[in-house]
Image: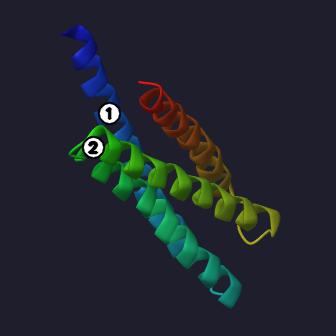
Amino acid sequence: MKLETDWIKFKKELRDRLKIFALDIIKLVQNLPKTPEAKTIGNQLLRSGTSTYANYRAALRGRSRAEFYSKLSISVEEGDESEMWLDILIESEMSTNQETKRLHAESIELIKILSHLRKKISNK
C-alpha cells in the first residue's frame, strides 16, 4: 500500500512541476524581444512547453499501460523540443537572462525524469 501511495504522490508532484514549467514558459515568451525571430521561436517554445504538461496529464488518464507509455513518450519529445528552443534562445543571445537559463536547466531535469519513468514503464 505504501508503494502505491508513493507512486501516486510522485505522479502528482511531477504533474505539478510540469504545470509550473508550462506557466513559466508562458511568462518567458511574453517577455521575449518583439522581433520576428523571437516571435517565431517563442511560438514554438510556447507550444512545446505547454504540450509537455498536457501530454503528461493525458498519460495520467490513459486507459492502458500502452496508452500511458504513448502519451508519456510524446511528453518526453515535447520536453526535448522545449529544451532545444530554450538553448537556441540562449545561444542566439535573444534571451540570456537568469530565468531563461533556469528554465533551460529545468527542462533538462524534466526530460531526465520523464525519460526514466518511460524506461521503467517499458521494462515492466
**Mark 1 Cα within 10 Å, few/some/many (few <14, many 20+)?**
some
Image check: 12 left or right of 120? left
Check the image and report above or below for 15 versus 37: above
**Position of 105 compared to 72: left or right?**
right
Disc 1 and disc 2 in contact, CB within 8 angstroms: yes
Q: Amino acid at mark 1?
A: Lys
Residue 60: which disc? 2
Q: Secondary structure at mark 2?
A: helix
Give the mark toward the camera: 1 or 2.
Answer: 2
**Residue 105 picture location, percent across and down:** 64, 44
Q: Which mark is residue 11?
A: 1
Residue 120 appears in the picture as rendered: yes
User: Please, is residue 11 above or below residue 52 in the view?
Assistant: above
Towards the viewer: 26 or 54: 54
Closest to the observer: 33 or 88? 88
Callout count: 2
Rendered residue at 23%/9% (across/down):
2
| Tag 2: amino acid | Leu
Q: Earlier in the sequence, mark 1 or mark 2?
A: 1
Secondary structure of the residue carrying tag 1 is helix
Which label sits on residue 28?
Answer: none
Quarter holding the C terminus is top left
Task: Using the numbered discs, state the Cα–Cα distance from disc 1 to disc 2 in whole angstroms.
Answer: 8 Å
Which residue does the image show at 47% across and 26% down from the upper left? 123
